[in-house]
Image: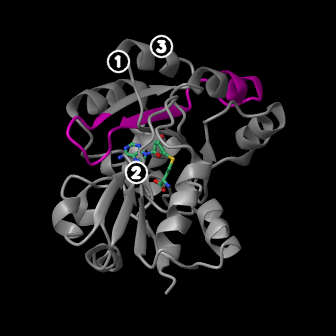
Amino acid sequence: MTGRVTLVGGGPGREDLLTLAAVRALAEADVVLYDRLAPHERLAELAPGAELVDVGKRPGHHAVPQSEIESLLVEHALAGNHVVRLKGGDPYVLGRGSEEVLACHAAGVRVEVIPGVTSAVAVPGAAGIPLTHRGVSHLFTVVSGHAPLTDAELANLAGLGGTIVVLMGVNTLPQLVAGLARHGMRADMPVAIVERGFRAGQRTTVGDLADIVVAAGRARVSSPAVVVVGEVVRLAHDGDASAADLMARAAGFAAVTS
Ligand code: SAH
């Protein structure tokens, strides 16, 4: 009998940010293919009946190519297994989840998608940064920094107003910042970079459009990290001490209290 695939959004990395539906799917899994950014430390307990396969990717080192992950999903399901594909964050936010769904459909394999807490929203939140705030920002845009943005995209982003959230954006930060500035974004627009959200070593680096590249270089900022560009950065609270200190210098808090 053909098995099935459940694509599970694992949230930003902390086990208690898994949904109940995610925990249930793991408990019923025969095979779990998991990513580096999904919570995986206690998978042996959460999925006691399952074979656990690490298909984790590191930036620049694709451990298992996407096409192979899709083949593995389909093969295990066709062999009659309940396959859980445990992914970081939400499967449908810059996570190639839809490609995996299409691969299952193409092979005639039943597939269900369980949403997850996306890092795009939760990681800024972990640093005390709300993506919207009445009177400050009523929209946010989530964009991949995996490859540099085009000039047209940068122009649109710069003109949009509101909050810009960049995933996979550490390596392309210089192009992003230069492009936004070139298209008229103010030099004192606050920028925060939140590394390793919800994990040991979570850290926030704050600056503005003019100095964030230098600040990030000095702090040796690395992936995984979420970049936030916008006035909402000034609203951060409960960030770590260095962030609070930087923010106090970088930001006129009075400017956003109206
Ligand atoms: N589908 C995922 C995103 C996949 S892209 C989601 O919805 O969250 C991977 C990127 O997500 C990373 O490069 C980083 O930018 C971000 N990310 C995921 N987990 C993170 C974490 N715990 N801390 C900081 N950034 C994280």
Q: Which disc is residue 198 wearing?
A: none
The residue indicated by pointer 2 is: 35
Crowdedness near tag 1: few (<14), some (14–19) or many (≥20) residues, C-alpha within 10 Å = few
118 in relation to 153, above or below: below
> Judging from the image, what secondary structure is the residue with disc 2 in?
loop
78 in relation to 165, above or below: below
Labels 2 and 1: the sequence-earlier one: 2
The residue indicated by pointer 1 is: 219
Question: What is the span of residues highlighted in magenta in the rendered image?
Answer: 178-203
Nearest to the eye among marks 3 and 2: give it. Answer: 2
Residue 61 lies, in percent from the top left, at 49, 30
CB of mark 2 near ligand 1 (< 8 Å): no
Q: Residue at x 28, y 68 (%)?
A: 50
> Judging from the image, what secondary structure is the residue with disc 1 in?
helix
Q: Nearer the viewer, residue 27 or 155?
A: 27
Q: Is residue 241 left or right of residue 55?
A: left
Q: Nearer the viewer, residue 229 or 197?
A: 197
Q: Is residue 175 left or right of residue 256?
A: right
Q: Residue at x 31, y 50 (%)?
A: 126
The residue indicated by pointer 3 is: 214
80 in relation to 91, above or below: below
Residue 168 lies, in percent from the top left, at 53, 38
224 in relation to 17, above or below: above
Labels 3 and 2: the sequence-earlier one: 2
Q: What amino acid is labelled 2 in the image?
A: Asp
